[in-house]
Image (tube, helix red, strand yellow):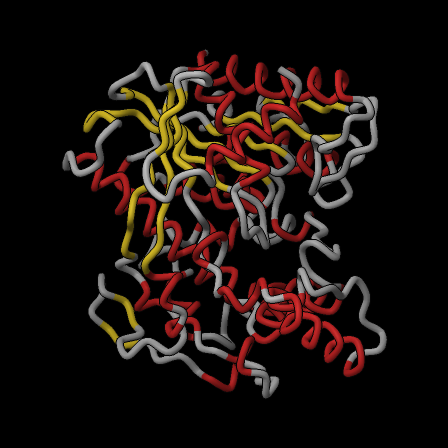
Amino acid sequence: MEYTELYEKLKNLFYSESGDIHSTELNVSIQKISFVSERSDLLLGSDTPGCIQHQIQLPENENNYIKYGLPAIDVTDFAIECNKKFSYYILKKADTAKSRQAIIFLHGLNEKKWDKYLPWAYELAQKTGKAVILFPIAFHMDRADPIWSDHHQMMEIATFRSEKFPDNSHMSFVNSAISSRLEAHPQRIFWTGFQTYSDIICMISDIRKGKIQGISQSADFDLFGYSIGAFLSMILKMADPDLLFTHSKLFCFCGGMTMDRMFPISKYIMDSRAAIHMQAMFAELLSSNFRGDKRLAHFQNEALHPEESWLKKMLRYNYFQQEREDRLRQLQTQIKAYVLEKDEVAPPAEALNTLKGKYRNLDIEVEIKDYPFSYSHMTPFPLTFKNQKSITQSFEDFISSAARFYSK
């Protein structure tokens, strides 16, 4: 089956039912699981901001936030209910009653729908026999405020950013919400990641307790990360909370580099002003040991939070390089990156720099591909009838590479 046909079949199937889905034709089942985040206390606007582990209050300094006077983007994070109560999906072979192995699948930045990932997850499940858990990053997919997908409302914000910041570039209604929110408070990248990190731990706990049908209580978990999902997966793997990922394999697609070596300026991701401000803020925080943000400083103190503090070691390439490479050396047989030569958001050279090490003395496999058709970071497999066979062949090569790695 060609890639475009598979995409259409899975998309139609995914939206055909509001609950669980079963297809004999495609040998696939998709289970929808309701989830309530237990760590929304981390977010701006919470009545109890602090550290549960150390029993201390860490009130947010609202002076660290820019206010635009636009309700759609000034809303406090805690007030966004759909980020706290949402659904994730388990996709697996229909002829497998209970999977003994699963892949936790993390998507890219500023994504609102699972559509493009359905063929990836489907083929991973078919080729590996593992269940694939489509888990949404905080404030993404159906955890995103619906107003951020309202064309009229977001065009108003894009126009506002264009008029207020004439030197800005790559503004669009697609990225206006995330650009505004990350410019207002770049540390949201951490709190979004930390909430997702905590939610994944809770999800695995639910599986261990037998609360989730279709996956064995004793299941092993691998990781798949695309783009920013690869960044978050790297932190999960290096941190290894509760030893959940000690033996896990991590496959990074279009990712694997430190945050500062990604270039997310795009009409589909974020505008230039937001991206530059975010990188400048992280450089300032790291150089001052988080002096300007006491709350973040607490969670990035490795003596207090040795696991969560791996975030700061993945923010900038030239910071914590020795510590990062020492840890990656321990994990070098468990991580692989598959990157694309013409990817301008996640350049392959930067995956090599991070995963192979400064002196290229890390034995992490980085596979670099260049497809014989027009592609991009956002659209590695275009939905076009032109070059259909080449696109399908390239997609199958990508899936085969991941499946071989997971089966080693």
Counting from the top left corner in percent of width and height, residue 222 is at 40, 28
Give above or below for 61 relative to 315.
below
Point 76% across, 66% down: residue: 171
- Viewed as shown, does residue 334 lie left or right of 345? left
The single residue placed furthest to the left in the displayed view is 209
Q: How many marks?
A: 0
Residue 268 is drawn in which quadrant?
bottom right
Give above or below for 161 relative to 361.
below
For this rendering, which residue is in front, 5 or 123? 5
Point 40% across, 56% down: residue: 194
- Viewed as shown, does residue 328 lie left or right of 200? right
Point 32% across, 22% down: residue: 101
Counting from the top left corner in percent of width and height, residue 266 is at 75, 55
Residue 371 is drawn in which quadrant?
top right
- Viewed as shown, does residue 333 lie left or right of 202? right
Counting from the top left corner in percent of width and height, residue 286 is at 56, 63
- Viewed as shown, does residue 48 lie left or right of 252? left
Give above or below for 279 relative to 334.
below
For this rendering, which residue is in front, 292 or 359? 292
- Locate the N terminus and report the quarter of the image it occupies: top right
Residue 390 is drawn in which quadrant?
top right
- Locate the C terminus and report the quarter of the image it occupies: top left
